[in-house]
Amino acid sequence: MNNEEFQKIVLEQFNVMNARFDSINKELKAIRTENKLHKLQTSENTEMLKALLHSVEVVKAEQEKTNMDINYIKGSFVTVETMAAQNYTDIVKLKAVGQ
């Protein structure tokens, strides 16, 4: 093999390697672009989850307040029933005295 043939082979191999590097660079660029999109989507998903968690906390607080209101109303109702029963007893006593 002479010098020209060797140079030709080296040049051909260099061109093959160069084409492979170009292909790898294109793939790497596509992967980087896809990675950026994934990061953006992850960030968006994180913000949505934070908003949902906040919403859940608000609903829980409202639910606790509603439960407290219901318990207060139940307690008030028991008081009203007790007072009504006492009033009924008093009415019966007054009727008995009036007869």
Image (cartoon, rainbow, N blue to C red):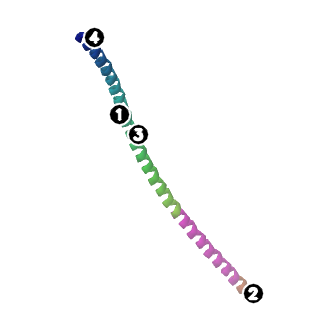
Task: Give the residue at x 34% y 26%.
Answer: 26
Task: Give the residue at x 27% y 17%.
Answer: 10
Instruction: Point out which mark residue 1 bears.
Output: 4
Tell me the mark number nearer the camera, choosing from 2 and 4: 4
Is 72 covered by the magenta stretch?
yes
Instruction: Point out which mark residue 41 bears.
Output: 3
Instruction: Relative to 34, say whether 9 is above or below.
Output: above
Q: Amino acid at mark 1?
A: Arg
In 3D space, how far apart are the residues under numbered discs 2 and 1 (Cα atoms)? 95 Å
In 3D space, how far apart are the residues under numbered discs 3 and 1 (Cα atoms)? 14 Å
The residue that disc 1 covers is 32
Instruction: Relative to 58, say whether 12 is above or below.
Output: above
Task: Give the residue at x 69% y 79%.
Answer: 88
Q: Main secondary structure of the magenta part?
A: helix
Q: Amino acid at mark 4?
A: Met
Which of the two labelled residues, at mark 2 and mark 1, occupies the earlier sequence position? Answer: 1
Q: Residues in magenta? A: 65-90
Instruction: Relative to 62, say whether 2 is above or below.
Output: above
Which of the two labelled residues, at mark 1 and mark 4, occupies the earlier sequence position? Answer: 4
- Percent x, y of residue 4: 23, 10
